[in-house]
């Protein structure tokens, strides 16, 4: 559903919007907001946010302080909204909010993470100067300069337009394939080669994508990895894919004694037809220890394993803690077991 942020919802912000001729929207698609910006020849910003940590109202209030912003279109899209999915696949963010500043023709000018005073200052500067802030980094994991990342993402957006309209993007792909390969670019290579009926090259990229089945990748690129697996194995489907099943997702402990050591057993089963790879086990508190130091497991189809933990409550009252299992499970790459304990002295 598309929403325009109204005076009723944001009365204090709306006055400044009116004076500065800004427009604020919620959950518009990239294509729709770009069309609005192009018609009015205005810079536009898309803010991908998580409502647990940042709201559009809060973000607007922060941006409106000290230095006014004029003639800009803003679109706030919650990260789990379907209109955010494709942008997240392209931009590969590690945290939210992320502000994407675009020229009116749809080219990325700058990418700015966070909602701090510093972040908002860089957003304002990017809008005012229509230029990137090279000293405010984005996705440092790439180990390359920010301008190279933005140039890459702009090409990836153009490639998307070409292949989705059935046109070859080979020349654009050739210009960036040697610089950086990440899952969505890999998928574009696979898709482009399928358009060209080059099955050998398509399977080459499908294999790379299929091997990228970490929990983080599966969370963002689930559909792309699924299509890659289908290309490599026509019998592959959601049923045959690795799938984790946990016997108890919540463990209730009553009348626990502080500093007592309580053994816990978690049973995991692979209900799929491909090998389940658990590549990490994370606990939310030092009060939970693995009985074994092993954090990686391979679980064959239809097999089960038992993993033991020690829970040592370190405070009185109610405790809520989590154990996370990070795997290549198609339907649940990050699986949680919650421990609820009532602790007495």
Image (cartoon, rainbow, N blue to C red):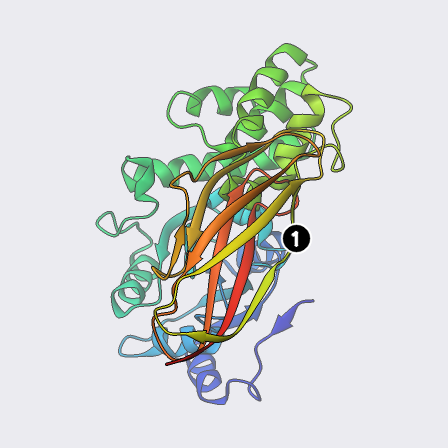
Most foreground residue, 178 or 280: 280
Give the residue drawn at x 38%, y 64%. Answer: 312
**Quick check: 204 above or below 248?**
above
Residue 172 percent coordinates (x, y): 49, 25
Most foreground residue, 297 or 145: 297
Quarter of the image for residue 99 reads: bottom left
Give the residue drawn at x 59%, y 50%. Answer: 85
Residue 308 percent coordinates (x, y): 49, 48
Quarter of the image for residue 180 reads: top left
Q: Quadrant of the C terminus?
A: bottom left
Label 1 environment density (alpha carbons within 10 Å; few <14, some 14–19, many ≥20): few
**Quick check: 148 above or below 42?**
above
**Quick check: 278 above or below 228?**
below
Q: Which residue is mark 1?
A: 247
In the visual, does 261 lie left or right of 117? right
In the visual, does 39 lie left or right of 165? left
Residue 46 appearing in the image? no
Most foreground residue, 320 or 162: 320
Residue 3 percent coordinates (x, y): 63, 72
Secondary structure beneath dot 1 equals loop
Count of numbered circles on the image: 1
Residue 87 percent coordinates (x, y): 53, 48
Residue 232 appearing in the image? yes
């Amino acid at each position: 559903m598309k929403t325009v942020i109204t005076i009723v919802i944001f009365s204090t912000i709306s006055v400044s919007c009116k004076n500065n001729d800004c427009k604020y929207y919620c959950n518009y698609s990239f294509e729709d907001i770009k069309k609005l910006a192009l018609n009015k020849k205005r810079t536009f910003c898309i803010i991908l946010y998580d409502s647990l940590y940042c709201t559009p109202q809060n973000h607007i209030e922060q941006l409106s302080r000290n230095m006014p912003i004029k003639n800009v279109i803003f679109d706030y899209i919650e990260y789990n909204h379907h209109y955010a999915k494709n942008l997240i696949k392209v931009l590969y963010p590690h945290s939210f909010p992320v502000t994407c500043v675009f020229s009116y023709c749809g080219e990325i000018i700058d990418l700015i993470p966070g909602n701090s005073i510093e972040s908002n200052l860089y957003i304002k500067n990017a809008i005012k100067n229509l230029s990137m802030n090279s000293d405010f980094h984005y996705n440092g994991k790439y180990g390359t300069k920010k301008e190279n990342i933005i140039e890459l993402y702009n090409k990836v957006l153009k490639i998307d337009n070409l292949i989705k309209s059935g046109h070859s993007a080979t020349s654009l792909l050739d210009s960036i394939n040697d610089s950086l390969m990440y899952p969505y670019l890999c998928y574009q290579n696979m898709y482009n080669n399928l358009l060209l009926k080059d099955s050998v090259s398509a399977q080459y990229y499908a294999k790379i994508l299929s091997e990228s089945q970490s929990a983080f990748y599966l969370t963002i690129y689930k559909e792309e990895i699924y299509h890659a697996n289908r290309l490599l194995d026509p019998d592959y489907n959601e049923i045959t894919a690795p799938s984790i099943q946990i016997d108890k997702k919540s463990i209730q402990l009553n009348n626990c004694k502080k500093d007592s050591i309580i053994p816990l057993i978690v049973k995991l089963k692979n209900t799929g037809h491909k090998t389940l790879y658990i590549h990490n086990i994370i606990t939310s508190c030092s009060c939970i220890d693995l009985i074994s130091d092993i954090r990686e497991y391979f679980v064959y189809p239809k097999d089960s394993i038992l993993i033991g933990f020690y829970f040592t409550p370190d405070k009185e009252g109610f405790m809520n803690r989590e154990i996370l299992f990070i795997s290549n499970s198609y339907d649940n790459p990050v699986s949680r077991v919650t421990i609820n304990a009532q602790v007495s002295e």
